[in-house]
Image: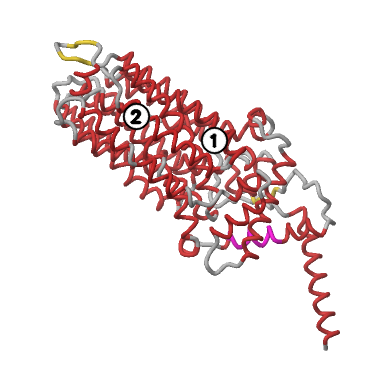
Amino acid sequence: MVAATVVPTAHIDASAADPATRDMIRRAQAADDADRALTIKQALRRYPVAVFWSMFLSLALVMDGFDIVVIGSFYGQTQFKQRFGDQVIDGVPAISATWQSGLSNASLCGQILGLAVNAWTQDRFGCRPTMLFFLVWNAAALFIPLFANSLGMLAAGEVLCGISWGTFQTLTTAYASEVVPTVLRPYVTAYVCMCWGLGITISSAVVRAVVNVPGDWGWRLPFVLQMVWPPLLFLGTWFAPESPWNAVRRGRTELALRSLNTLKASDETESDAEAKLAYIQYTTELETAETAGASFLDCFRGTNLRRTEINCVVWAAQILCGNAILGYSVVFLERAGFSEVHAFDVNISLSICYLVGGVVSWFLMARLGRATIYMGGLAFMFVCLLATGGLGWASPDNDTASIAIGVLLVIQTLFNMCTIGPLCYPIVAETPSGKLRYKTIVIGRVVYNLVGIFNNSVTPRMIDVAAWSGLFYAGTNLLCLIWCWFRLPETKDRSFGEIDVLFENHVPARKFKYTKADQFAQYRDAVAADHVDDEKKADVEHLEMA
């Protein structure tokens, strides 16, 4: 296939004849060339500080992942059911489907509020101050579920905690993508998903460990352990550098340069940091020329509408791919014939898949494109869900069918976390324009939470019949797969500036991979002429000195 070439459709307001503009473009081009030349090993060796801070702030997602499993597992925990059970089934206290939906959705409702607030606070105050404020908020809010004496109080605590978790969901992804070189961007954003999985793994182990703890401490101890994270993260975040992209968008050029000097390689000079600053300024000014405003409405105008669509569907597919069942895995397995203890044991295996799969995804991303891996994961999970649906028709007393369902859950979870789960994060971080990155990711995550609310309302009512659960999500998975084939672009090895150019030129998703984007084309001749003039001037000065 012959590669077409596209160039920016927007222009920087300043004239190309302006020496300051030409100097900025020359520096930006040099920084882009240096960034493009980096290999993975070189980037890891030269930019350990940038990698460290991106990975450290991502640890905030551990708390969100922790809560998902804790609340879902409580519905099958004897101590929790004895304390809060609002109905009796076969002489045993139980949590009704209505309250299961209510408790699971409480956190999601809070997260939607947090997402909306975060879209404003990050643009207004920056990543670091926003992170510090909501870590304090989270530490205070955790006391409410810890001392809850009713399901209503527990739900209220989940809403307040959810506000801070909603903030962390988008802040960590955007921050990780903006502080590291392009070649490392997919790995640090996928690591965000691994942190979420780490929280799930820790909570699964904690819930299993307290299964025999008598009384209220059986469900309170997990909340106590969760309170360890906010103070540790607050202390580290206090010393973290601000995102240079965020600082430039807020007009804080000096702050951006300080951050770049903190994040730069040990063998780089301040001139190298200034060149990177020039690239950020150049890309930001092009985006400003393309998108005059930076409101939520601008996310639905022009080429940004397509970017917002991609964000929304990729986030929603995290649930609709069939991963939704895993949030209710303990109850699902018990309905399939597992004992309470064995269901918790399998749940730990499912959680470990999040970490193992995340590491495997790093090796896949080095060789395959984002869209290829994402669609491959959807196709494989579709087959697993069909098989789970078929086995669901078997009797709960059929041990062979129960074991097969448990094995399928582990396999599809592992494959999901090698593909769909971690690949979501680089895609949603790369596809928005820089000026609207936070707002676009927020809109996508709000859609994710709305789909989660739907899932939490439907799944508890389907969970008694494993067949319906498997077949229903096989159908939603297939719809996502069809959409990805026609609409999901390939952004592997593309800089933010190149991605902007491809979207501005309305390049179809199937041609993203093969189209060359030259973001400096409009100014290349002028910059080259400047370079020739500089060489001539240097020769003249050399002759005069001679």
Residue type at mark 2 is Phe
The reply to whether residue 477 is in sight is no
Label 1 crowd bin: few (<14), some (14–19), many (20+), radius 10 Å: many
In the rendered structure, are the residues bearing label 1 and label 2 in contact, judged by CB atoms less than 8 Å apart? no
Along the line of sight, the residue nearer the viewer: 54 or 514: 54
Q: Is residue 357 magenta?
A: no
Query: Which region is colored magenta?
Result: 27-36
Q: Is residue 31 magenta?
A: yes
Cα–Cα gap, marks 1 and 2: 29 Å
Label 2 crowd bin: few (<14), some (14–19), many (20+), radius 10 Å: some
Residue at position x 21%, y 21% in the image = 335
Count of marks overlaid on the render: 2
Query: What residue is disc 1 on?
Result: 441
Residue at position x 19%, y 18% in the image = 82
Residue type at mark 1 is Ile
Q: Quadrant of the C terminus?
A: bottom right
Q: What element does badge 2 sit on? A: helix
Query: What residue is disc 2 on?
Result: 143
Tell me the quarter of the picture where residue 269 sits. Answer: bottom right
Residue 103: where, in percent of width, then height?
A: 35, 21
